[in-house]
Image: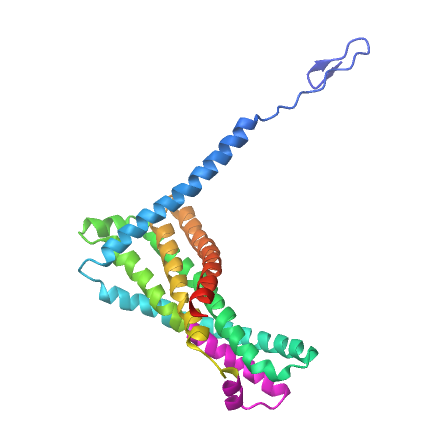
Amino acid sequence: MSDRGFTSVAGVNPPLPVRRIEPLSSAAGYATKLFNGFFEWFGSIGIFSWQVLRAAVTPPYEWRELIRQLDEVGSKSLPLVAMAGAAIGVILSLEARYSLSRFGAKSMFPVTLVYSVIQVMGPVITGLVVSGRVGAGMGAELASMKVTEQIDAIEASAINPYRLLAATRILACILMLPLLTIATDAFALLTGWFAQAIVEPLSFHQFIANGFKGATFGAFVPPTFKTAVYGLIIGLIACFQGMRTRGGAAGVGRAATNSVVLASLFLILADVVLVKFILVVFH
């Protein structure tokens, strides 16, 4: 009588099949490959950054493309950051009013909302929203140009693709992020005041006067302009992921996804460093 290829003789049970155990060397090899790929990625983006910087500072300059990218990054992102700022303003207003009421500090509401929006929430929310919209768009656009050999055609036409495609997009992100952050802060403060004024009478003039009382340069300007670093991160990673794409349509999808994920991750990590830097230098 056979059972799974084994023969039972005189009541002797057939031997159990032996499960193969993967050697530890395969796991170690995978870890080594992952480790090497991590440093290879940083080395590649370092070389890419140097090529973009060298192309950006040498003439001829692509002013027309830069203006187009400023409109693409700035004007078309404004509705999104405005809605995000408005939502954040209402949320912070509700939370701040509830928390301050518990401790009998309702008079601190304007200062709390202003500092929370301008120093913390406004820059981060703007960076993440722009990363989702602009990062994915740039990554997918450049990736599609790469897989369809349009970038190779541009290079064959004696035009530097790093200057035309990468430098203009990165510079547009750097210039537009602080302006978009100001728009986010403005909408957040406006809706935050409105949410408070519905519950308790509070004039907008009084809200602004109390909120910015004792304001200093180091309290508001550096947190706003640190978003230029966010713009550098978003533009650099999106262009890098797009221009190194392989694998056809699937590669375009991977480039768009990786652009958003990596840009958002490095943006949050950069925020940790920048907050500490601002606290040390400007306070």
Can I make out residue 147 in this image?
Answer: no
Q: Is residue 149 above or below residue 206?
A: above
Can I make out residue 229 in this image?
Answer: yes
The answer to whether residue 50 is left or right of residue 90 is left
On the image, the x and y values in percent for residue 245 come to 37, 47
Q: Is residue 240 above or below residue 72?
A: above
On the image, the x and y values in percent for residue 12 come to 79, 11
- The secondary structure that dominates the magenta segment is helix
The answer to whether residue 19 is left or right of residue 150 is right
Write the start and end of the magenta stretch as one range.
181-210
Q: Is residue 47 above or below residue 176?
A: above
On the image, the x and y values in percent for residue 81 come to 46, 71
The quadrant where residue 8 appears: top right
Total label count?
0
The quadrant where residue 113 appears: bottom right
Q: Nearer the viewer, residue 238 or 283?
A: 283
Where's the N terminus, which quadrant? top right
Q: Nearer the viewer, residue 169 or 216?
A: 216
Residue 184: in magenta span: yes
The quadrant where residue 112 appears: bottom right
Residue occupying image coordinates x 48% and y 55%: 265
Residue 195: in magenta span: yes
